[in-house]
Amino acid sequence: MVTSVIVNIVGGTDAQNTTAVTIGDVRWGLNGTANFGTAQNVADGNSLLTVYKTTQPTQIAITVEARGYPTTLNITVNADTISVQTA
């Protein structure tokens, strides 16, 4: 099963330095298969969400769960942390 997921970068001190986000092997942004704000299908279950940015650290990752229903993830990107909220 797959879940339709939209990823948005909504703020934080490193929001403008964010280049891409992956959930599992699905990528938004630079070299991705969709821009931020566009829905893509993500495998249901737990996956690693990784934010890529141009400042150190260049990657920050957490585990998220796709639960089988359309979801929008609003991500706040700071220097060393990210927070993810569902909309």
Image: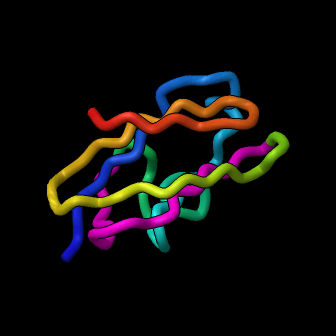
Picture quarter with the C terminus: top left
Is-magenta flag for residue 52?
Answer: yes
The quarter holding residue 11 reads top right
- The residue located at (45%, 68%) in the rendering is 26
The image shows residue 83 at horizontal and vertical percentages of: 52, 35
Q: Relative to residue 26, is residue 13 drawn left or right?
A: right
Magenta stretch holds residue 36: no
Image point 75% across, 32% down: which residue?
Answer: 79
Q: On the image, which quarter does residue 84 sit in?
A: top left
Residue 86, how many percent across, how many down? Answer: 31, 37
> Is 82 drawn above or below residue 60 in the view shown?
above
Relative to 80, 75 lies left or right: left
Q: Residue furthest right?
A: 56
- Image: magenta residue range: 38-54
Quadrant of the drawing holding the N terminus: bottom left
| x and y percentages locating residue 64 in the rendered image | 42, 55
Q: Residue at x 58, y 56 (%)?
A: 50
- Residue 17 horizontal side relative to residue 24, left or right: right
Is 20 displayed left or right of 2 in the figure?
right
Vertical arrangement, residue 3 with respect to residue 52, above or below: below
- Residue at the image point whose x is 65% and y is 41% from the top: 18
Residue sitting nearer the eye, 35 or 80: 80
Name the residue furthest bottom. 1
Scheme of image coloration:
rainbow
Q: How many numbered marks appear?
A: 0
Does the magenta stretch mainly form a helix, a strand or a loop? strand
